[in-house]
Amino acid sequence: MLGRILKYVKMSPLLISVNLLALTLFLTFANIVVDKNASFAWDEKIRLLINTIRTPQLDHGVELFTDLNSMTGVVFFSLLVLTILIYNKWFKDIQFYIVSVIGASILFIAVKYNVQRIRPSLEIVDIGGYSFPSGHTTVSTATSLALYLIFIRKLKSETLRILLVLICLAWPLMIAASRVYLDVHWLSDVLAGLGLGVFWVTLLTFFFKKSEVKK
């Protein structure tokens, strides 16, 4: 077992490095948030800066955009993805995608109710629950990375590959920015969500790829 793990680590040093960096990012923010004596001064500075650029029209547009990654949006999009995967009979990818999205959702909920960080003022969007980490950011990151890992080797066109990379990078970052703009999350919440999402999917990749190492 140890030999197989070491063999895989040698095969995928970049993946292992990204996994550890993502975990470090998440744990760093989690540690400071849990420590009641610590604070992110720049969380409040960013919040005050965003307040200077807000307009009612922009508020409405950003709210509509962030709702694309609500539970309803994620379910609808996932059904489209799963339809494509089922049609092509990529059954291992189906398992990988489902575990990526559902696992990320379970993870962020578990962390939220253990940390119980209070949200910002909620002046624009009135939602309940706790703040750390951002669930929208965690799930959008996990979804985007899972899609990238599934389709990057299947696409033959270099143009489509570049487009896939750009979309998978831009989507979670834009969702993260929208959550901070709407004042439902601190900046540290969304950064932790990015780290948690990347950590989870890269960890899953390790286990799903073990079967290849056995060959």
Image: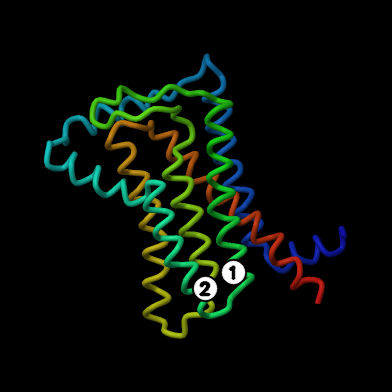
Answer with the quarter of the image where residue 196 lies.
top right
User: In the current view of this chain or complex, which residue is farthest to the top?
Assistant: 37
| Residue 90 vertical placement versus 142 (above, below) | below
**Which residue is disc 1 drawn over?**
93
Residue 131 in the image: state x and y as whole percent.
Answer: 44, 29
Residue 72 in the image: state x and y as whole percent.
Answer: 38, 50
Q: Nearer the viewer, residue 75 or 67?
A: 75
The three-letter amino acid code for the residue at tag 2 is Leu
* Residue 31 appears left or right of 130: right
Q: Nearer the viewer, residue 101 or 14?
A: 101
Number of other residues with Cα within 10 Å of mark 2, as a class: few under 14, some 14 to 19, many 20 or more:
some
Number of other residues with Cα within 10 Å of mark 1, as a class: few under 14, some 14 to 19, many 20 or more:
some
Q: Quadrant of the N terminus?
A: bottom right
The three-letter amino acid code for the residue at tag 1 is Asp
| Residue 85 vertical placement versus 74 (above, below) | below
Residue at coordinates 37% horizontally, 53% vertically from top-left? 73
* Residue 69 appears left or right of 144: left
Residue 3 in the image: state x and y as whole percent.
Answer: 87, 63
**Which residue is disc 2 drawn over?**
85
Could you tell me which secondary element the residue under label 1 belongs to? helix
Q: Quadrant of the C terminus?
A: bottom right
Residue at coordinates 41% horizontally, 59% vertically from top-left? 169
Pick whichever of labels 1 and 2 is earlier in the sequence: 2
Q: Are marks 1 and 2 in contact (CB under 8 Å)?
A: yes
- Colour pattern: rainbow
* Residue 120 appears left or right of 84: left
Residue 40 in the image: state x and y as whole percent.
Answer: 43, 25
| Residue 48 vertical placement versus 27 (above, below) | above
* C-alpha separation, residue under disc 1 versus residue under disc 2: 7 Å
Residue at coordinates 39% horizontally, 58% vertically from top-left? 76
Residue 126 numbered tag: none
Could you tell me which secondary element the residue under label 2 belongs to? helix
